[in-house]
Structures are given as structure tokens and as C-alpha cells.
Amino acid sequence: DTGVSQDPRHKITKRGQNVTFRCDPISEHNRLYWYRQTLGQGPEFLTYFQNEAQLEKSRLLSDRFSAERPKGSFSTLEIQRTEQGDSAMYLCASSFREGGYTFGSGTRLTVV
Amino acid sequence: AQSVTQLGSHVSVSEGALVLLRCNYSSSVPPYLFWYVQYPNQGLQLLLKYTSAATLVKGINGFEAEFKKSETSFHLTKPSAHMSDAAEYFCAVTQTGANNLFFGTGTRLTVIP
């Protein structure tokens, strides 16, 4: 078990472009979470999956953001028409039950 | 509503000195509490967690934290700081049935040789 993997580690994109990030959770974990962390702040919750069902979305997740977990394994987070305010670290976490969160190393997005 | 407040955005200690990082929580129901460490450009690593068992929780790397309900606190301590402890530390809270963690704004620990 290699933990939670996120790809890419870094992404630089021009404003207005679309980007997609991938998260591979720990294989036996049925819960998957996405968080966003801006500079100097703690992570903020974006969305939560249990298996393939997206059960909760934060109001931070605007219409330009979409997340999927098609087969209950890996997940993708897409940002359409990126804005400079989207620049942040995007963190994925997984768990088997409450209280057992394991975080990935994150994808750092820079919008120029 | 749940939240955590981390007092002190920056803490500096000398190598070998006591580390004390403060966290106060707000929760209307019994909380689960966590401390995470983050090194530059890395994800979050769990140091320890409180899930309603023993109030004194021991974690990795010599850290421990004590849950004090009367003070709504969950302060992180380590008897003797090491240079490798220099990092950002986050306190987080959740509750049974909740699907996300609420994080504090973090405390950057500097260890002075």
C-alpha cells in the first residue's frame, strides 16, 4: 500500500484553461475527500465521496469545479475556466471510517 | 457549528526546549480532534488523534496532546524540540457522522539551534 497518490504534483496553467487532477486513494478506503489550501491557511473542505456517490459539496465548490469518482476507486477534480483565485494546493484524503483520514501530498496549482 | 482556533501563528523554540502549540475547539457535540504536521510543499501527516478514548493521546515523533473538555482545548506538546520538528502544524475537529474536517489556520514552528 503506497498511501494516497495525487497527480500531478505541480500544475501551471494560463487563466481560462481547464485543468484536471487525479487522486488514487488507499485501496480499501471507501471514503474520499478533496480539500483546498491557500497560502497561509488551513485546508478547506471541498467535497466528499462514499464509494462512487458524491454525498457532500461545500459552497466553495463553484459551478466551475466538478469532481467524480466513477468506479469508487480513483477520483478526478476538474476546474474549468481557471481564475487566478484558484491558485492553491489541492489535497485529497481517504478513509475507511470516521477519524482515519490519510492525506496525499497534494497538487499545487498556479494560474498565471 | 464546529471550529478550531490556533493561538499563535508562529512559535519559536530553542532546540531541546519544550514545544507547546495551542488549540481550542468549538463543538456542540463530543468532538474528534486531530493534529497534523505539514512540511513545505507536502501533504498533511497525522501526528495524533482523539476519538473519545483516553484524554491523553500519544502520537508519533514524541508528540502528545491532552483533551480538556472543561477548557475546550487540545494543546500539542513535546518535551524536547528537535530541528526536524520545524514545520507547520494544524489542529482539526470533526464529529461523529460528519464528513469533513475543520482545520485551524496553522502554527508555524521554528526551532532555533
Image: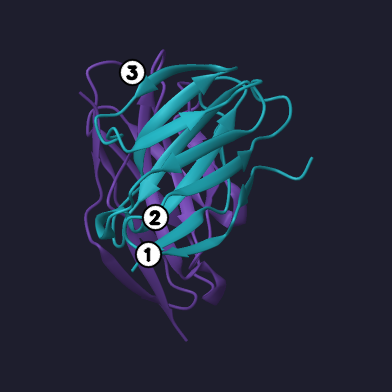
Chain colours: A cyan, B purple
Using the image, determine if residue B30 lies above or below residue B65.
above
Q: Chain of mark 3?
A: B
Which one is in front, A91 or B97?
A91
B6 sits left or right of B62 in the view: left
For image coordinates 33% across by 18% down, the residue present is B30
The spot of residue B37 in percent (x, y) is 48, 55
Q: Closer to the observer: label 1 or label 3?
A: 1
| Residue that mark 2 sits on | A17
Which residue is identified by label 1?
Answer: A14
Kindly identify the amino acid type of the residue bearing the numbered disc 3.
Pro
Marks 1 and 3, how far apart in space? 45 Å
Q: x and y percent of residue B5 in the render?
A: 22, 45
Question: Label 1 crowding class (10 Å Cα cut-off): few <14, some 14-19, many 20+?
Answer: some
Residues marked 2 and 1 touching at CB (< 8 Å): yes
Looking at the picture, tell me which residue is in the foreground, B53 or B90: B90
Badge 3 density bin: few <14, some 14–19, many ≥20, Cα 10 Å: few
Q: Tell which tag, 2 or 3, sits nearer the viewer.
A: 2
Q: Are marks 2 and 3 on the same chain?
A: no
Vertical side of B66 occupied by A55: above or below: above
Which residue extends farthest right?
A1
Front residue of B71/A95: it is A95
Q: Is residue B107 visible?
A: yes
Query: Helix or strand or loop: what does disc 2 sit on?
Result: loop
Q: In the shown orientation, is residue A78 left or right of residue A81?
A: right
Check if mark 1's residue and mark 3's residue have beta carbons within 8 Å: no
Q: Which residue shows up at 28% across the image and 27% down it?
A: B69
Q: Can you see residue B101?
A: no
The amino acid sitting under disc 1 is Lys
Please tell me whether mark 3 sits on a helix, a strand or a loop.
loop
Rendered image: mark on residue A83: none
For label 3, the residue is: B30
Residues at marks 2 and 1, CA–CA distance in whole angstroms: 6 Å
